[in-house]
Amino acid sequence: FETVPRSMFTIFRCSFGDCSTSGGTPLFEHVTEAHGYLWSLILSGFLFMVAIGLFNVISAIFVESTLASAAEMAANKKRMRLANETRWAVNVAALIRCLLIKSGQDIEELDNRDDVNTTGISERYLAKVLNTEFPSDVIDEVVKDKEVVKALDNLDIDPHDHAYLSDIIDPDCSGTVGVLELVDGLKRLRGDPRRSDIVTVDLVVRSLQEKVTDVQEKVVAVWHTIKANQHDHRDKQPRTPRINDTKPVHHAAVKGLRHNLS
């Protein structure tokens, strides 16, 4: 600590753990002997703040930026995977092929290349596959196959959804799933759940609620109209006399009538 530059160099060395003299002895002992315990305590507090506080903050900033960059790179990589049309087509075709084999379809007959279109698929194959319906039990068995599991993993579909795939992509609960329903369901299952998925469901439910409310109001109005028409029709009908409605006849009048008849 003889000069300012030398003192700065000494503080720099102490900040990185090399707090010793040129002879190799600890610097704190010399500070204590020359200036007392107060300066030694101040130097210790300074080194503690630098080593524990400042360096940890700097390390945390570097770690946070590294993790953020890694997460962004992973997200970009996943977006590229989801946007890869070749990966999508190959894995969906593999999945449909396994379903066709499991359901007993003749692959050789379907793959007849006598009338091949520009996509390399026969018209007969395309038409028959698009009209194929797969039962739910067939899908439940196929999703256990290693090739199908690999295809679903390549499509970035959550492994926890594999066992419930037949229920997820069968919204009408018909027990069968068509090829177009399968393709549309797999496309919606790809990737991580997003806020837009929840918002979409919420908007659809609100729209259905409004429609149901309108239908309920119209049904109530029709019911009131029917009740009013029934009431008016009852009022317009001629009233038939009842026995209780006839007026009582006096006994004297009855006797006079009998006397005249006799």
Image (tube, rainbow, N blue to C red):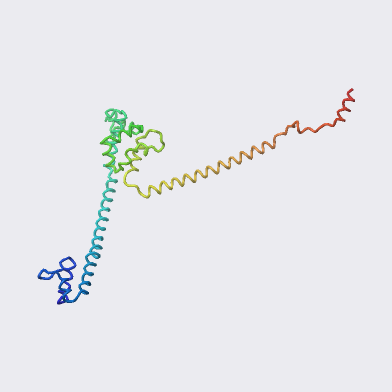
Residue occupying image coordinates x 26% and y 49%: 77
Q: Residue furthest top?
A: 262
**Can residue 131 be seen at all in this image of the molecule?**
no
Horizontal and vertical percent position of residue 221: 58, 42
Can you say which quadrant of the picture contains the C terminus?
top right
Horizontal and vertical percent position of residue 180: 35, 37
Can you say which quadrant of the picture contains the N terminus?
bottom left
* Drawn side of residue 34 relative to residue 157, left or right: left
Horizontal and vertical percent position of residue 182: 34, 37
Front in this rendered view, residue 156 or 252 = 252
Horizontal and vertical percent position of residue 13: 16, 68
Task: Tell me where residue 33 sits by quadrant.
Answer: bottom left
Front in this rendered view, residue 196 or 108 = 196
Residue occupying image coordinates x 47% and y 44%: 208
* For residue 54, above or below residue 243: below
Front in this rendered view, residue 261 or 85 = 261
* For residue 206, above or below residue 145: below
- State the count of labels: 0
Task: Tell me where residue 49 sits by quadrant.
Answer: bottom left
**Can residue 81 be seen at all in this image of the molecule?**
yes
* For residue 22, above or below residue 219: below
* For residue 63, above or below residue 241: below
* Drawn side of residue 88 relative to residue 247, left or right: left
